[in-house]
Amino acid sequence: MQFKSEPKVYKINLKIQTPVHIGCGEEFDVTEFYIDNNNLVLYDKQKFIDYLNKLKKVEEFMRIIDEGNLTEIVKFINSNAKEKEIDGIKIPIDKDIIERYNELYIKNPDGKQGSDKDRKNINLFFIQRTSYLKDKNNTPYIPGSSIKGAIRTAYIEKIYKTNEGQINIDNYNERGAYKSQKLESDLLKGSFTKDPFSEVKVSDFIPIKCERKIKIAKNFSKKPPHKEKLYQFVEVITSGEFEGTITIFKKGNIVNHISLENIVDACNEFYGNNQNLKNKFVLRIGKFCGAENITISDRRVKTKSGWVKESRTEWICVNYFTDKYNSGKKFGNVTLEIKEV
C-alpha cells in the first residue's frame, strides 16, 4: 500500500443526546434473569446452581425444564434466584415492561399458558440487547462501524447533491433492484481499495461514563393522528460520554481524498446541525433512527408506488405503553467533538 502522507489521528469525544440502541444480534433470555427493585438482574448461573445444590433442588429444577413449561421455569428462577439475591449484572427496566413480564410469567395462575394468543405472547417476549463489551458488567459501547457507516451516508449524500442533474438515479435500477453499491462507487469514484473511505479508520468508542435502561420502542405513523403500529423492548444507552479516534491517511491510488473538514461539513448538513462549528458534528446512529438517516435521498423507502424520500412511520423511545408520539424521544442522536489531533 502506497501512502502519500502520515496518518492523522483525531481524538473524538461522543455524547449521547437521545437513546441509542445498536443491535448485537442477542436478546435477554427470560430464563437468564430475574427482576427485582425495577432492575433486570442477569444472575450468575454457577452461583444459582450451587445454591440449588445446597437446597437439594437441582432435580426439581431439571424436572421443570424437561416439562418445557416456560412460565414454570421463570417462576422457579424468580422464587429462588430472587429470594437468595444471586449476584448479577443489574440493568434498570421500565415499569410497564415489568408489569407485562409479571402478567405473562409471575401472575400466571398454575403456570397455565392459556390460549394460542397467550402462548404466542409468552414465546415472543424478548428484549433486544445493545452492543456491549465482554467485561464483568457487559458495559455498552459504540462500534466504530456504526460511526463510520453514518459518516459515509452523509458524505455520499453531499456528493450526490453536488452532482445533482449529472447522475440519473433511474440508471441504478435493474429489474426492480436498486444497485446501491454501483451508485456509491460512481459517486466516490472508486470501490474496494480505491474507495476513499479505505483511508478512514474509526475505532470503537469506549464509555467514559454511561447509563443504560430497558425501554419501550413504539412505531408510530408520522402523519396525525400518529397511529400506533408496533412496539419492541430494547436495551438503550440513555446518556453518557464515549471516547474514540478517527484516523485519516492518504493513499496513492485514491482519486478523491477525504479530510476531517469534509466529514464535519457533510455530517452537519445531512443530520441537521446548523451551528456551523468546525470542531463538532452530529450523527444519528443505531437501530430505529429511520430510513432517511441511513440512505441517500431519492432512494430511501420502497413502497408499492415506488421509492419515496421519507418513511411513513417512525420509532419513538417511550416510558409507558400509553405514551403517544410526542411523549417520547427519537432514537440515535449523538454529538461528536474533536478534542485533539
Image (spheres, grey):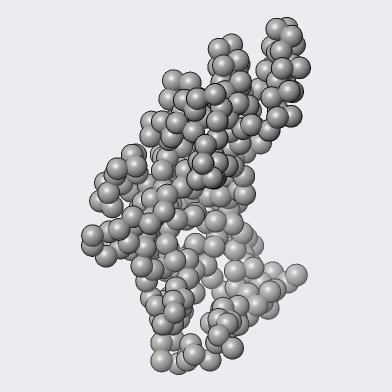
Residue 243 location, x and y as percent? 51, 44
Answer above or below: position of 32 versus 162.
above
Q: Is 310 or 34 nearer to us in this picture?
A: 34
Task: Look at 37% across and 71% down and name the residue there.
Answer: 310
In the depicted structure, whether residue 183 falls above or below residue 23: below
Identify which residue is drawn at 74% across, 23% down.
62
Query: Which quadrant would residue 213 be assigned to in this image?
Result: top left
Front residue of 212/316: it is 316
Residue that extends furthest to the left in the rendered view of this protein? 224
- The quarter of the picture where residue 58 lies is top right
Percent position (x, y) of residue 334?
A: 41, 51
Task: Give the percent coordinates (x, y) of residue 159.
Answer: 46, 79
Q: Tag count in the figure?
A: 0
- Let me know if residue 52 appears in the view: yes
Residue 261 visible in the current orientation: no
User: Which of the two residues, 74 or 135, is positioned nearer the viewer here?
Assistant: 74
Q: Residue at x 61, y 20 (%)?
A: 76
Q: Residue furthest front?
A: 115
Coordinates of residue 187 in the picture (x, y in percent) = 53, 82
In the rendered view of the protein, which quadrant contains the N terminus? bottom right
Q: Quadrant of residue 103?
A: top left
Q: Residue at horizontal 42%, vertical 40%?
A: 215
Left or right, 67 with respect to 148, comes to right
Q: Is residue 201 positioned above or below 129 on the image?
A: below
Residue located farthest toward the top when viewing the structure as drawn: 54
Q: Nearer the viewer, residue 34 or 293?
A: 34
